[in-house]
Image (spheres, helix red, strand yellow):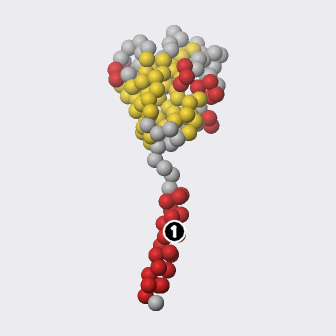
Amino acid sequence: MAIKEDSMGFRKWLVPAAALLLATPAFGGDVRVEIANLRSGDGMVRVAICPRETFTQPSCPYVGAAPASRGAVVIEDVPDGVYAVQAFHDENGNGDLDRRRFRPAEGLGFSRDARMWMGPPRFSDAAIRVTGDGMLTLTMRYYQ
């Protein structure tokens, strides 16, 4: 009888524990984004890794920044999935993408070297698959 009670107690513990493990999201990988073609080491480089829903929006969930002099930003714990990566060279360090006459005054770059034309690129033009740790290079482009 004692063995039966122990095994029942184990089963009562096992089912909720298994459910908890299945409900816990997996940790993602670290993505290193190297920036090519920076025109200076001034300011910061700001990078966002975005799912379709938040591409080019300020609510992008995976963001990071580093001094431009480093030339790279690491964003941690990005879950596997399809994303577009966007970056800008915040040369004056004010946290904003500055514009002059509707054109960016600071550099911009997108994954897959997607180019701007009358606005930001389409998500599909910049989309990449992230699986675990990885590295990619973005080319910074300046429009003024």
Q: Mark 1 = which residue? A: 16
Q: Secondary structure at mark 1?
A: helix
Name, please, the residue furthest toward the top.
Answer: 144
Tell me where residue 81 appears, x and y as whole percent: 56, 39
Say which of 28 and 92 sits in front.
28
What's the residue at 47%, 43% (across, down)?
A: 28
Position of residue 44 relative to residue 141, above or below, is below
State whether residue 81 is above or below residue 70. below
Residue lying at the far left of the rendered structure: 69
Q: Quadrant of residue 129?
A: top right
Q: Is residue 11 above or below residue 80?
A: below
Q: Where does residue 9 sit, x and y in percent of width and height? A: 47, 79
Report whether residue 70 is seen.
yes
Residue furthest to the bottom in view is 1
Q: How many marks?
A: 1
Q: Nearer the viewer, residue 91 or 46?
A: 46
Residue 92 occupies quadrant: top left
Residue 64 in sight: no
Task: Look at 47% across and 29% down and name the residue there.
Answer: 47
- Residue at horizontal 64 percent and vertical 28 percent from the top: 124
Residue 37: % across, % down: 44, 14
Q: Residues within 10 Å of mark 1 (few under 14, many from 20)?
A: few
Between residue 5 and residue 122, name the one nearer to us.
5
Q: Nearer the viewer, residue 45 or 138?
A: 138
Left or right relative to 82: residue 132: left
- Give residue 127's position: percent from left, percent from top: 59, 29
* Residue 65 in which image quadrant: top left
The amino acid pointed to by label 1 is Pro
